[in-house]
């Protein structure tokens, strides 16, 4: 089943849909030339509905994981509060606003080492001018933290749910 960029494989045994890995699903689809065709029984549509429900439950869990964001405490939380405060300043250009949002997200994701975070807090302590705070933070945070990381890709979950391939499998060795 597919929704946006999310693809999952399910198999139902009559009562419970079970998510399986891609390679497991391919083993079920493997057929020899001598194997005879099996007629689709009436339970096919019941199994299809079970698999759809299983996909929807997995999708709901996945969306819950994406929307749940750990609250940051300590020094990371302090920096995030500073960034939220300076983001309200109207003196920044659109590009600077994007940099502020990027900095906020790298701290929320936990990508900044504690040493850099402590240095930001130490250098900005007592400052009240948002523009000065912004430029001070830019000086402290290394450029490599502003680059997008390739490891974590967000999955596109937009669009309608689609059943890509649905088939009835007879019980066997797999």
Image (cartoon, rainbow, N blue to C red):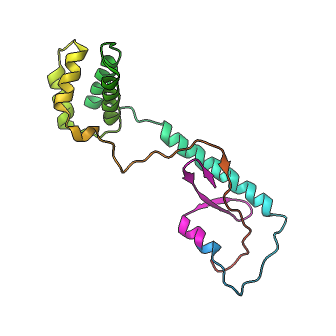
Return the residue nearer the eye: 35 or 60.
35
Question: What x and y, as percent, mark residue 35?
Answer: 72, 84
Up the image or down, 154 lies above or below 116; here it is below
Question: What x and y, as percent, mark residue 102?
Answer: 33, 32
**Quarter of the image where the C terminus is located:** bottom right
Up the image or down, 57 lies above or below 12; here it is above
| Magenta-drawn stretch contains 163 | no
**Quarter of the image where the N terminus is located:** bottom right
Question: What x and y, as percent, mark residue 2?
Answer: 61, 53
Residue 19: name its quadrant. bottom right
Q: What residue lies at 28% left-to-right and 29% top-to-bottom?
A: 74
Of all residues, the one furthest to the bottom in this rendering is 34
How many discs mark residues in the rendered view?
0
122 left or right, relative to 72: left
Q: What residue lies at 67% left-to-right and 51% top-to-bottom?
A: 162
Report if residue 113 is visible in the image. no
Question: What x and y, as percent, mark residue 60?
Answer: 59, 43
Return the residue nearer the eye: 129 or 81.
129
Q: What residue lies at 71% left-to-right and 62% top-to-bottom?
A: 166
Up the image or down, 108 lies above or below 126; here it is below
Return the residue nearer the eye: 48 or 141.
141
Boundaries of the magenta span: 1-26
Up the image or down, 58 lies above or below 97; here it is below
Residue 33: name its quadrant. bottom right
């Amino acid at each position: 089943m597919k929704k946006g960029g999310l693809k999952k494989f399910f198999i139902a045994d009559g009562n419970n849909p079970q998510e399986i890995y891609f390679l497991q699903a391919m083993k079920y689809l493997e057929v020899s030339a001598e194997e005879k065709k099996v007629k689709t029984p009436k339970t096919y549509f019941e199994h299809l509905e079970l698999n759809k429900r299983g996909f929807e439950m997995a999708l709901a869990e996945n969306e819950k994981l994406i929307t749940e964001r750990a609250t940051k405490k300590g020094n990371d939380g302090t920096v995030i509060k500073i960034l939220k405060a300076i983001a309200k300043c109207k003196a920044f250009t659109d590009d600077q606003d994007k940099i502020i949002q990027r900095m906020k997200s790298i701290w929320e994701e936990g990508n900044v080492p504690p040493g850099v975070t402590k240095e930001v807090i130490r250098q900005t302590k007592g400052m009240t001018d948002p523009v000065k705070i912004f430029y001070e933070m830019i000086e402290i945070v290394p450029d490599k933290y502003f680059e997008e990381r390739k490891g974590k890709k967000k999955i596109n979950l937009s669009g309608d749910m689609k059943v890509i391939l649905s088939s009835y499998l007879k019980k066997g060795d797999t």
